[in-house]
């Protein structure tokens, strides 16, 4: 079995060159337009965002309906889903490396739809959490396979550019999902929010079945044996760059999970915005979508390392200033939104680039690598984010402290990955933009 964390042989180098050539050829021979390929990958990943953000306006009603006394315990509706989503990715990665991308995706979508429908009629909070856990397991297929097919098809800065566009498109869901949830609850109970999820997943499922190509070449499928799976995990976990950037990405996404867990309490309990909550949430999510678009336009020329590492330093400085101010005063709404939106502006230069940097060395193990990366981001990220959310004490200080802490941890991981040398590009600039290609 080849190692990926040291010097490579000429045979391995030839294999990597051949692999890159095949990936570039497959990109030009996609049976669907590139814009549709990006939109479909974004829609698959957006099902995960939909399952989280559409719930936020309903947490209070769910808690009241199912007898949940503690307001912080309502957050478990989000946490249970994220735990299933994170753990399920360890399964779908190796399976997709063996059977291709389409079949595991279909299975995961079916689980997602069934679990969402079952959650709509759950008679108790415990059963609701069980179905949310199962729904997260099904959603794991959408995340792993979306990232895998991008890595099957693109590499280097081009992969980061595509991932930024995907992140930008699927960020439209946080913009509109809380509003959809609020709209549903104007006319129906919280149960219909789960029905809305199931219908959305059915639409994306039909689109995927009809249009999504199989991107994994037969010669690169790996046997699904215990030794093969363990060997694949070992290769991923012993690659310094992959592992450290995966941890950095995990810490950054933990900040977002922490905000999502406590967003409803912050906006409603502290700032009393009521029905304006979805609008404010959408505005900040719009900043994040713009940030991902900006990253997609800049990464080809500036490079993943320079852009992401610079963005992290900016993110750290904003988070530190936010923490200091929150300790000194009771922050008004306008100032909280200003700090949070400012933090989201560099955020778009972190997620997509960290993902691409972690995935880049392991193209022939894209499914396994995506599963480990996704597990770390969502399972570990959800646990850290849940800790940030559970620290809510009626102020925004725990959230600001969480943002500051995870950005310091991410910076340490990058310093280890790059052996202390930051802002060192390792990929040649690319000409044009993905959106310019037909």
Image (cartoon, helix red, strand yellow):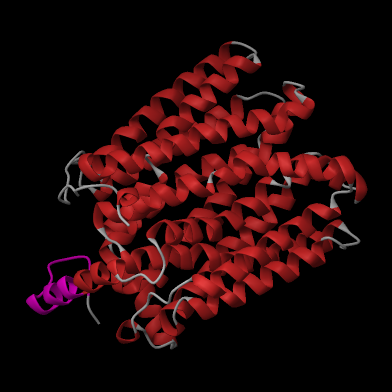
Q: Quadrant of residue 346?
A: top left
Whole-percent x, y for residue 183 in the image: 79, 41
Q: Is residue 265 above or below residue 124?
A: above
Q: Residue furthest top?
A: 329
363 displayed left or right of 12: right
Considering the image in quadrants, where does the C terminus appear?
bottom left
Whole-percent x, y for residue 53 in the image: 66, 45
235 displayed left or right of 15: right
334 displayed left or right of 80: left
Q: Residue furthest front?
A: 438
User: Is 15 in the magenta?
Assistant: yes
Q: Which residues are magenta?
A: 3-18
Q: Is residue 29 above or below residue 71?
A: below
Whole-percent x, y for residue 277 in the image: 71, 30
Q: Quadrant of residue 241?
A: bottom left
**Visible in this render: residue 69?**
no
Q: Quadrant of residue 158?
A: bottom left
Q: Is residue 243 above or below residue 278?
A: below
Q: Choose between 406 and 270: the one closer to the eye.
A: 270
Image point (73%, 26%), residue name: 276
User: Is 118 in the magenta?
Assistant: no
Whole-percent x, y for residue 216 in the image: 37, 77
Q: Choose between 49 and 65: the one closer to the eye.
A: 49
Image point (50%, 17%), residue name: 324
């Amino acid at each position: 079995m080849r190692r990926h964390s040291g010097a490579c042989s000429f045979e391995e180098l030839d294999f990597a060159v051949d692999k890159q050539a095949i990936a570039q050829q497959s990109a030009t021979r996609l049976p669907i337009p590139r814009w549709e390929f990006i939109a479909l990958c974004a829609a698959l990943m957006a099902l995960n965002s939909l399952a989280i953000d559409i719930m936020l306006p309903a947490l209070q009603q769910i808690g009241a309906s199912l007898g949940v006394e503690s307001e912080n315990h309502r957050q478990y509706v989000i946490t249970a889903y994220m735990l299933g989503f994170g753990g399920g990715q360890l399964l779908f990665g190796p399976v997709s490396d063996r059977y291709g991308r389409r079949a595991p995706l279909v299975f995961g979508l079916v689980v997602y739809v069934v679990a969402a429908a079952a959650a709509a009629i759950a008679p108790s909070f415990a059963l609701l959490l069980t179905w949310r856990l199962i729904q997260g397991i099904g959603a794991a297929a959408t995340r792993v396979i979306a990232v895998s097919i991008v890595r099957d098809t693109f590499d280097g800065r081009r992969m980061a550019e595509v991932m930024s566009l995907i992140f930008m498109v699927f960020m439209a869901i946080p913009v509109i999902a809380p509003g959809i949830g609020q709209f549903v609850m104007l006319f129906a109970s919280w149960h219909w929010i789960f029905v809305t999820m199931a219908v959305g997943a059915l639409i994306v499922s039909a689109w995927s079945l009809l249009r999504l190509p199989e991107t994994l070449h037969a010669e690169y499928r790996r046997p699904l044996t215990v030794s093969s799976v363990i060997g694949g995990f070992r290769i991923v976990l012993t690659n310094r760059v992959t592992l450290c950037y995966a941890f950095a990405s995990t810490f950054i996404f933990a900040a977002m999970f922490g905000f999502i867990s406590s967003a409803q309490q912050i906006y409603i309990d502290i700032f009393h915005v009521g029905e304006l909550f979805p609008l404010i949430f959408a505005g900040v999510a719009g900043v994040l979508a713009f940030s991902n678009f900006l990253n997609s336009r800049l990464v080809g020329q500036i490079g993943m390392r320079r852009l992401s590492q610079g963005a992290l330093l900016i993110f750290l400085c904003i988070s530190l200033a936010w923490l200091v101010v929150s300790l000194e005063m009771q922050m008004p709404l306008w100032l909280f939104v200003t700090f949070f939106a400012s933090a989201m502006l560099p955020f778009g230069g972190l997620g997509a680039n960290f993902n691409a940097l972690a995935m880049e060395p392991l193209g022939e193990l894209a499914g396994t690598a995506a599963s480990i990366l996704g597990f770390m981001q969502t399972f570990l990220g959800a646990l850290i984010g849940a800790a940030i959310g559970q620290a809510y004490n009626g102020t925004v200080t725990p959230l600001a402290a969480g943002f500051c802490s995870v950005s310091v941890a991410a910076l340490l991981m990058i310093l280890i990955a790059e052996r202390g040398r930051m802002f060192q590009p390792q990929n040649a600039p690319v000409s044009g933009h993905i959106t310019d290609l037909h």
